[in-house]
Image (cartoon, helix red, strand yellow):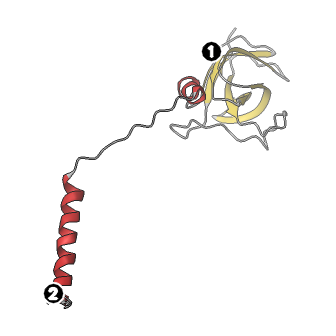
Amino acid sequence: MKGRFSTNSFVGGIMIGVLLAGVWFFSGTPTVTPVISSSPLNARTATSTPKSGSVSVGNQAPGNVVIVESVTVPPPGVWVAVREVSGGDLRNVLGAVRVSGPRRNISVPLLRATESGRSYVVQLYRDDDNGIFDLAVNSVYVDFDTGARVVAYFMTTN
């Protein structure tokens, strides 16, 4: 009997093995091993880098400069562009300035002054790393959470 191999014994052994593996797999509570990083770079990035983008601008007097209240974007930053609005459509870019991260009270010099009683928009654009704003090359910056473009409308008032 010692040297004899039986197909029934083999199949029975496989079935017992599968049964024991199933009991072991489904009966235990999962163990979660936390990953702890002592790197100061990881800690700083997680707490200080904005995860999305936003821009804020208030109504203001017409002129050759638009003051943007705040821009919140992660580095390396964006272009902040002022555009005309006509009939709900975005029109000409009147001026743009590059910011390299979150900033407040940004002055955007304009190529042509805004006019009283008109609508304008501040829109964010990604930089293509050439240091020059080009509407045809720089893509519109979108909010990471919603996928919507980051814009803020304002009016000029006297």
* Nearer to me, 65 or 117: 65
- Residue 64, compared with residue 142, is above or below; it is above
Q: Are the residues flagged by discs 1 and 2 in contact, CB closer than 8 Å?
A: no
Residue 108 in the image: state x and y as whole percent.
77, 19
* Nearer to me, 69 or 18: 18
Task: Name the image quarter holding the N terminus.
Answer: bottom left
Q: Disc 2 residue type?
A: Asn
Q: Which residue is mark 2?
A: 8
- Residue 21, compared with residue 124, is above or below; it is below
Task: Name the image quarter holding the C terminus.
Answer: top right
Left or right, 81 with respect to 112, comes to left
Label 2: which secondary element: helix
* Nearer to me, 73 or 146: 73
Left or right, 52 with respect to 13, comes to right
Residue 113 in the image: state x and y as whole percent.
81, 19
Q: Disc 1 residue type?
A: Gly
- Residue 125, compared with residue 136, is above or below; it is above
**Residue 109 numbered tag:** none
Q: CA distance from mark 1 to mark 2?
A: 83 Å
Camera-side mark, 1 or 2 = 2
Q: Which residue is mark 1?
A: 58
